[in-house]
Image: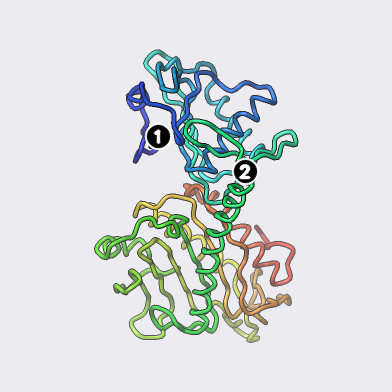
Amino acid sequence: MAFDGLDISEITEAHITALIGTLESRDLDFKQQEYGRADQDKKEFAADVSAFANTIGGHLLIGVAEENGAASTTPGITGDIDTEIQRLESIALTGIQPRIIGLQMRAVPMAAGNSVLVIRIPKSWNSPHRVTLQGVNRFYLRAGSRRYEPDVDELRQLFEGGRTLSQRIRDFHNERIAKIVGHDTPVPTDNSSALVMHVIPYAAFLGGTMLDTPTLSGAANRFYPMAATGMNRRVNLEGIVTYTGTAAPHPAYTQVWRNGCIEAVRGLLVVEGRTNGVKAVVLNELTRKLLGGIDQYLKGLAHLGFQPPFAVLVTLIGAKGAILHVGNTYFDEQEQFDRDILTPSEIIIDKIPTTDAEMQDILDPILHQIANAAGYDAAPGI
C-alpha cells in the first residue's frame, strides 16, 4: 500500500513524486482536479471514499494527474486548502452513513507552491457504508482501479462482516463480565461491587499484532490499575497483569492481553455514608477513575503500536439498591440504581484525545447512561 508505515503527517513531496509511474489500484486513486461543488460532484466524492472504506482502505490523492492509469505528473491544487479540507470533511460526515472512523486528510506542500491533498481512508470496521446525499442510498466497493456497486451476495457479505466484528467484541466483553462476577479473575479481587473497563482495539479481532512477553513487561508501567499510585505485576498465559495490594483480595488489577485487549477492574464501587449507612456510587470518584483509566490505556496502547479504532465498554457490578451520590453531603439522594449489573452502550474512539476536554466528551455518554439507571435524566453537573 502507498505510504506504508508512514503517519499521514510524515508524507512529503518526495513520497508523492516517488509514485510517478505507479498504477492506480484497489487501494490507490489519483485525481488531477478538486471535486466540484455541484451535488453530483459531492456524491462522486462520497462514493469514492465509501468504496475505499468498504473494501481494503487506501489513499486518494487530489492534485496528481494520471495517464493510462498511472501517475504521470503532480500539478497539485491551489487556493485555500484548509477550506477545501473542511468542505470535503463535511461531505464525508453528512453524506456517508455510518460515519467512517479514522478518515484523515492532509495537504502536502510541493516545491512549485501548490499542494497535493492526501486523503487516507482506513479499512472500515463498521461497514458497510452507504452514500446518503440528497436522498441517495447506494453502496460501493473497489475492484482494481474502479469503483462499482456490489451485487446482492457481496452486499450480504459486507453486512455480515460488520456484524461479526461487533459481535465478537461484545461476546468477549460479556464472557469476561461473567468470569469477573464468578470470581474467575487473573488475581483474587473483591467483586461484590466493582467498576470494570474494557478497552479493545478493533485490530485485536482481526489477526493483528500479538505482543511478546518482553514487550509487555517493558510497558507494564503504562497500565497501572485504575486510580492506583503503585502496583505489582506478573506475567500470565494471556499476557501481563498489574495489581494493587500485597495480599488477596487485591483492590484492583489491569490485565493486558497479547492482542491488545485491556481489562481494568476496581473493587469497592459501592461505599457507605458516614452516618446513615446509605450505600452509594460517588459520581465524582467514578468520573475520576474512568477518565484516568481511559487516558492511560489509550496512550499505553498507542505506545505498543495499536491504532484506533478502539471500543470502550464500562460495567458497574453490584450497583442495585445503591444511590448515585452527586451532592456534597453523605448521602441524602433518594434515587437508586435499578439493576445489579449495568453496562452502558460501548463508545468507539477513532482518535486518541489530546486534551482533558476531549477526554470528557468521550466519557460523557457513558456517565449520562449510568445516571439514567439511577433515575436521573442526565448526569448532574455534566
Q: In which quarter of the image is the N terminus?
A: top left
Which residue, as the protein is rendered here, is positioned at the far top? 112
Q: How far apart are marks 1 and 2 (CA)?
A: 37 Å
User: In the image, residue 345 lies at what x, y percent?
Assistant: 62, 62
Question: Compared to 62, does 364 lie above or below?
Answer: below
Question: Compared to 226, does 141 lie above or below?
Answer: above
User: In the image, residue 137 lies at what x, y percent?
Assistant: 70, 40
Q: Residue 151 carries which label?
A: 2
Q: Is residue 178 left or right of residue 224?
A: right
Residue hosting label 1: 9
Q: Is residue 258 left or right of residue 192?
A: left
Question: Compared to 319, does 72 lie above or below?
Answer: above
User: In the image, residue 177 lies at what x, y percent?
Assistant: 52, 75
Give amino acid for label 2.
Asp
Give amino acid for label 1.
Ser
Q: Is mark 2 on a helix, strand or loop?
A: loop
Which of 160 and 221 lies nearest the eye of the viewer?
Answer: 160
First in residue order: circle 1 vs circle 2: 1
Q: Which residue is drawn at 40% across and 57% down?
A: 207
Label 2 neighbourhood size at 10 Å, few (<14), some (14-19), many (20+)?
few
User: In the image, residue 273 lies at what x, y percent?
Assistant: 61, 82
Quadrant of the rendered image containing residue 287: bottom right
Q: Which label sits in the foreground, 1 or 2?
A: 2
Q: Which residue is drawn at 73% across and 67% down?
A: 376
